[in-house]
Image (cartoon, rainbow, N blue to C red):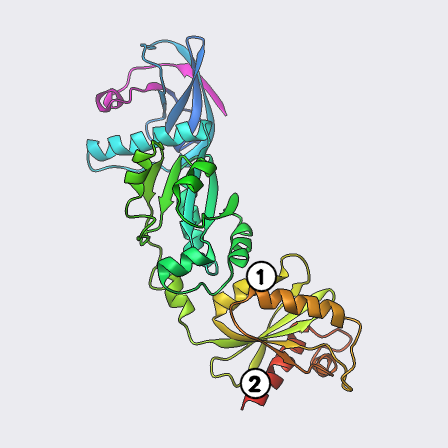
Amino acid sequence: MKITGIVQEGGKTGRTLGFPTLNIPLAQNLSGIYAGTVLVKGTEYHAALFADPARKILEAHAIGFKDEAYGENVTMTVLQKLRDVKTYPNNEELKTAIANDVRMVENYFHPARIMVFGTFDGVHEGHRNFFAQARSLSGNPTLIVSVGRDRVVERVKKAAPRLSEDTRLALVRHEPLVDVAVLGDSEGYLAHIQANKPDILALGYDQAGEFVDALEADLRDARLKVRVVRLEAHKPEMYKSSKLNAKKTVSLGVDFGAKRIGLALSNRDGTLAFPYETLPYDAHTISRIAEIVVKEGVGVVAVGDGRTISGGENTVVPTLERFFTALKEALPVPLERVREAFSSIEASRFAPEGKMHDDSAAAAIILQRYLDMRK
């Protein structure tokens, strides 16, 4: 949106705070802080724009413009909203907010590479908030997520991760807020940081230890100009990985098909199985199951063996064997084979008349057989 007007004199609050502004009348229905540009005296400048509908004024702090412009005809281009209007109790807090707005404008025109580190032993809502907070540090971010190597996680946390590094990397790569996901360094972190060239390193609210305590000093010693930001907690009583992973486990049932994978979950007493979800069988199936294993606190996975009542192989068994092997390598929990003969026929009894059964119902029958065998 382009808005043209004559620069008029204001209250000079911005000038007092070190951020002088050009003010023009605002007739449009616009409110908030924006990244934009100002064309003044034949030169275009990047600018932080403040649209104030109450005063009907559009203010612009044109970055790098130091001249007077009262009475000049200028054009302001509104490009990207940064935040809503907010009132501040004093000028110091207002000055800090404006400085942050200017930094976000600079990031908008010069994209910021933001890097975060973690184990990501299953991705939950706490992690997604972590990614969102990191992205909010720039108006035009590229979010790079470094996933800890198995050996490093085990050394730092004194316990091996539940999921393999390749599975954890695949889970992170599927997150829509993540632009780039990479495996971390096997030893230190400075070379890893240098290789990914971040402008900002964002730390979780509780991240500490060997890769954090000396981080800023190490960056200075290596002459790396990287800003370090500590992010805020997001419902740590609910979304802390150690708490999620400590829940009482359930069992997961799997009905394999050439096109679809049926899944079922048990109750936490391990007595009853229930249909859970049906997934398409594609390149993302293994990582999706791995995510469910962590999210739901699964302790064992029961997979239908694909064999007939006489023990013979049906047509999907070769593909099933490859699936079983890949799943076993990806998951941190044991897999059990369960005889699945007639499970689909039994599941079809509960399907609406004239419709196929859901594969998750067949998975529930397989899982119930497994639970009954353990009694």
Residue type beneath disc 1: Arg
Q: Is residue 308 above or below residue 235?
A: below
- Residue count near mark 1 (Cα–Cα under 10 Å), binned few <14, some 14–19, many ≥20: some
Q: Quadrant of residue 241?
A: bottom left
Q: Nearer the viewer, residue 108 or 249?
A: 249
Q: Which mark is on residue 210?
A: none
In the rendered structure, the answer to whether residue 69 lies left or right of residue 370 reads: left
Q: Position of residue 59 (x, y in %)?
A: 35, 23
Q: Which residue is mark 2?
A: 371
- Is residue 53 something one can see in this rendering? no
Q: Position of residue 269 (x, y in %)?
A: 47, 83
Q: Which residue is mark 1?
A: 288
Numbered disc 1: secondary structure: helix
Q: Is residue 52 above or below residue 5?
A: below
Q: Residue furthest front?
A: 187
Q: Position of residue 103 (x, y in %)?
A: 36, 30
Which residue is at a point 37% across and 67% down the rendered structure image? 243
Q: Position of residue 261 (x, y in %)?
A: 67, 68
Q: Nearer the viewer, residue 293 or 67?
A: 293
Residue 20 colored in magenta in the image: yes
Q: What range is drawn magenta here?
A: 1-23
Q: Quadrant of residue 350?
A: bottom right
Residue type beneath disc 2: Leu
For marks 1 and 2, the one nearer the N-term is 1
